[in-house]
Amino acid sequence: MEAVTVTDLPAPPTPAQQLDTAEQQASEELHAIIAAAVAAGITGAALLAIVAPLMNAVSRAAQTGWTIGTRIAMNAAVGQRMGRNAYFAEPLPTSVEADVAAVVADAAQRVDAAHTGRPTGGVPVTPATPEVELARFQRRMVRLAVTKIHQAASAATYSYTRWLGLDLEWVTRRDGKACAVCTAMNGQRIGPGKRFTPPIGRGIPRKLWAGFQGLPPAHPSCRCRPLPREPRPRT
Ligand SMILES: [Zn+2]
């Protein structure tokens, strides 16, 4: 019988893979909650009734993102480096509760408008069918969960590298799908507690997404990450 060597064991998932898994789990969970809620009919009331479970699901996803972001920072803390600055947890740019509530309220109005055939509340658009609005709602909820996962991962990495006194480098996704903003950000380095500066120039929108406050993600569906780097000597 052959001995199992360490090299036979599967490699542990990378942080990027862990983030992908977290996105997938959140997507499945959100779809299940929404499917159960509209089983008896697609109505605005049915969507409003699941605000709390949706908030819980997105909060759990964000918590997973925070844990992954913490690991990214702590993996860089080699040599028993101790935190030299005060530690405090960086908050997300906007809260899970507020974001979920806004998406659900808008979707409920759109679904009701689709049933009556005329705009309802603050929804100025030509109503689509309830099924179309439901599909739109599902996409928006998943995109929100993905955003919160990445905002939380970034905030955690930021909080711990600030504590440890490490630099951060903006690293874009490797699949060539980074937008003009993120491509311009790639490789930018900041010291502990500093924020990334948005680029200016050709192809860069003058007004960036409100959820971007100096840390990735720069926009919904952005998969950029801040990665810890040893601080460069400063003069
Ligand atoms: Zn990006």
Image: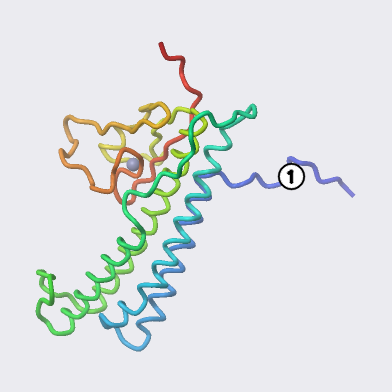
Secondary element type, mark 1: helix
Cβ at disc 1 under 8 Å from ligand 1: no
* Above or below: residue 222 compared with residue 187: below
Q: Which residue is mark 1?
A: 8
Residue 199 at x, y percent in the picture: 24, 31
Q: How is the image coloured?
A: rainbow
Residue 1 at x, y percent in the picture: 90, 50
Q: Nearer the viewer, residue 161 or 136?
A: 161
Name the residue furthest bottom. 40
Question: Residue 75: in sight, yes or no?
Answer: yes
Is 1 displayed left or right of 27 in the figure?
right
Q: Residues within 10 Å of mark 1 (few under 14, many from 20)?
A: few
Is 115 displayed left or right of 90 in the figure?
left
Residue 100 quadrant: bottom left
Q: Nearer the viewer, residue 178 or 22?
A: 22
Location of ligand 1 given as a quarter of the image: top left
- At x 34%, y 46%, the residue is 222
> What amino acid is labelled 1 in the image?
Asp
- At x 47%, y 51%, the residue is 65
Name the residue furthest right. 1
- Total marks in image: 1
Residue 193 at x, y percent in the picture: 40, 32
Name the residue furthest top. 235
Q: Quadrant of the C terminus?
A: top left
* Above or below: residue 122 compared with residue 87: below
Name the residue furthest front. 86
- At x 23%, y 48%, the residue is 210
Residue 103 quadrant: bottom left
Question: Residue 177: in sight, yes or no?
Answer: no
Residue 233 at x, y percent in the picture: 46, 14
